[in-house]
Image (cartoon, rainbow, N blue to C red):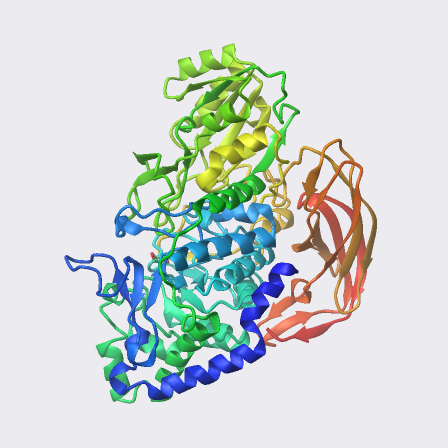
Amino acid sequence: MMVLALCATLINTASYQEAETRARQIVQAIAPSEQLRLLHGFLALPFQGRAIPTGAIGSAGYVEGIPRLSVPALQETDAILGVANPSNVRPGDVATAMPSGLSLASTWDSEIAYRDGALVGDEARRKGFNVLLGPGVNLARDPRNGRNFEYLGEDPLLAGTLAGYAVCGIQDQHVVATVKHFAMNDQETARFNVSAEVSESAMRESDLLAFELAVEQGRPGAVMCAYNQVNGVYSCESSHLLSEVLKSDWGFSGWVMSDWGAVHSARAAMNGLDQESAAQLDGLLFDEPLAAAIASGAIPEPTVRNMNQRILRSMITVGLLDHAATPSPIDYAAHAQTALEEAQRGIVLLKNDGLLPIAPSIKRIAVIGGHADIGVISGGGSSQVVPVGGSALLEPSSRNESAFSGYELYDPSAPLGAIRALAPHVLATFADGRDRKAAVALAQRADIAIVFATQWMTEGADASDLALPDGQDALISAVAQANPRTVVVLETGNPVLMPWLPQVSAVLEAWYPGQKGGEAIASVLFGKSDATGRLPITFPASDDRAAPPAPNIVRYTEGSDVGYRRYVKQGLKPLFAFGHGLSYTTFAYSDPRLTGGDTMRATFTVTNTGSRSGTDTPQLYLTRKAGEVQMRLLGWSQVTLAPGASRRLSVIVDPRLLAEYDSQLHAWNLVSGQYEAALGEASDDLEYRASTSIVGRTLKP
Ligand code: BGC
């Protein structure tokens, strides 16, 4: 609640009205020669032999201001995993490398999302930026998507809620947040052209719902439209998506900027695009071609005024005109602590036969693979951060299909060093895993073995399958055969298959854990912190999507049944289900009460039945509706309890989650009837199924 109140200071009605009036005054004062100034930006990187634009700091993007009217330039930077420094355009500049989006989503913690946004917003502002090109909220429809690591998982409620809080955190620093990539940008293969084919109702109940919640809860100043087409229309030219859904149905009052190189014609201005980003990439369409379209009357003046009004209103609401982003020192030490806490909270304990937390009696640990002696891996593409302390390792990737650097960057937080620091009584020895025999020999001599396995994902390329690359499965298997007391620590950008799972004692999913990843992993391994993460994405048991990501058209035949919803409907068993994650203690639920009426409310008691303090994330799911199997996350709560302690918690359901979107009605259709819900620790671990009656009605989108 506290964080929402903070966010609300930016979006109360009075300040909105004031911003509206101020923006209108500026728009009225804009001279004809200035009216396109805010409507197109430039790549703020050296491009085709040209230096970066004058006035730009150097980053992904720059939009000239109108100094005569005290309108500052927009200095735009990627993004939510930390302030990027593409091509080292700001020589030597570093930033706190935050854990990946999937790590953040694994915390299921809105306050952490807020703090993450606030940290990155603070660093952006102190480097002189006033627009952050994130967060991304595309749903993980395909576990091979190269950018899933940047996003917040497969569920619209979880992703949209966390994105909304991250937006609040960013904008409380007087930096505009940009929710992206709108919409259905769910694969990287052929991302510039591929058309996502999906019905209106399926979109509204899935990917669009994530955006809707993020926009509603965070009130971002900007939304970025995507590269791909949706049902045959480019996202940045889709009047349906931009004008009807985003601006009209959801009342989005900010501006729509394009993705970099995603505009195909000046006509996009008629369909709801307000600003062309990095215009050099498209041929400067919102410059002379737009001017010509205005002059010919093809694009009316009021449309152009509205585009300016939207940009200025957001700038004023977020405080860009009154709180200039001026360079100032950054408290990297404090930020490292936040990065550490977030990474700890995002680590998911997938399997544990009791070996973890590592007991004080363990004296010899074999640490193997994953460059665990050097650092932790990060993801590639525009979100790549050069961490404080510099990259620990830049290794050419065996998977260099993307347009981006092709180098795997390791953040300087070595798990081996962190293990040694946390457990000085332990003899921790390292083998890099390249020599399998040496790794096996080391494991044989140790009390336990910990194998670190990495999977590099990058913007611009999808994984071809779900296997760990570079023979790591065989390495894990060989080590586990030599010493069954083997723990696997995964640093991956997506779910992976685990053919060796029955052979090992424990598995931790640490994702890309960022600046303090090594310390976070060590802390969970030794039980200094509880294992608190819960999966925001299903781990498939096999590569069950037959076709590789499609180059021209991708048909999302699962409709709104993304991830776990499809698994449950089709009776498939995942390797690890959405919502799964073990703790070092145990919890029990009791005295559940489910009530209906206008919506569903659940109250229940959680008790820590184990012997250590721990954090639980009880989840409420819709399981049946009108007698049919249905599966939707309806809400969750989170509580940290001492052993033996109990707390009464409640979840109030957003009625849209109980409804179907009806495209004929142009509304959510909530049908009267019996709705069955269940409480549980994961989408496949449910108890207390109960039904309640809901009063039907239609709800405005
Ligand atoms: C990405 C965006 C990013 C932009 C600027 C694009 O290639 O899709 O997510 O914000 O570049 O770097």
Q: Is residue 314 visible?
A: yes
Which residue is situated farthest in the right direction here? Answer: 591
Is residue 512 at all visible to an observer of this figure? no
Position of 502 compared to 326: left or right? right
Residue 697, x across and y down, in percent: 71, 74
87 or 673: which is nearer to us? 87
x and y percentages locating residue 205 in the rendered image: 58, 63
Residue 31, x across and y down, in percent: 28, 86
Image quadrant, ligand 1: bottom left
- Image quadrant of residue 701? bottom right
Q: Based on the displayed image, in which of its 4 quarters is residue 195 positioned?
A: bottom left
Image point (31%, 48%), residue name = 93
Is 372 displayed left or right of 611 in the figure? left
Which quadrant of the figure contains the N terminus? bottom right
Tell which of 167 and 241 is nearer to you.
Answer: 167
Q: What residue is shown at x 65% (from left), y 36% (from top)? A: 582
Q: Quadrant of residue 614?
A: top right
Residue 333, position as x, y percentages in the image = 46, 43
> What count of labels does the image hold?
0
Q: Judge whether 218 appears above or below 487 on screen.
A: below
Q: Residue at x 41, y 70 (%)?
A: 320
Residue most extreme to the left: 49
Is 376 or 293 nearer to us in this picture?
376
Instruction: Please name the residue shown 41% across and 81% down the image.
Output: 309
Q: Is residue 497 above or below residue 123?
A: above
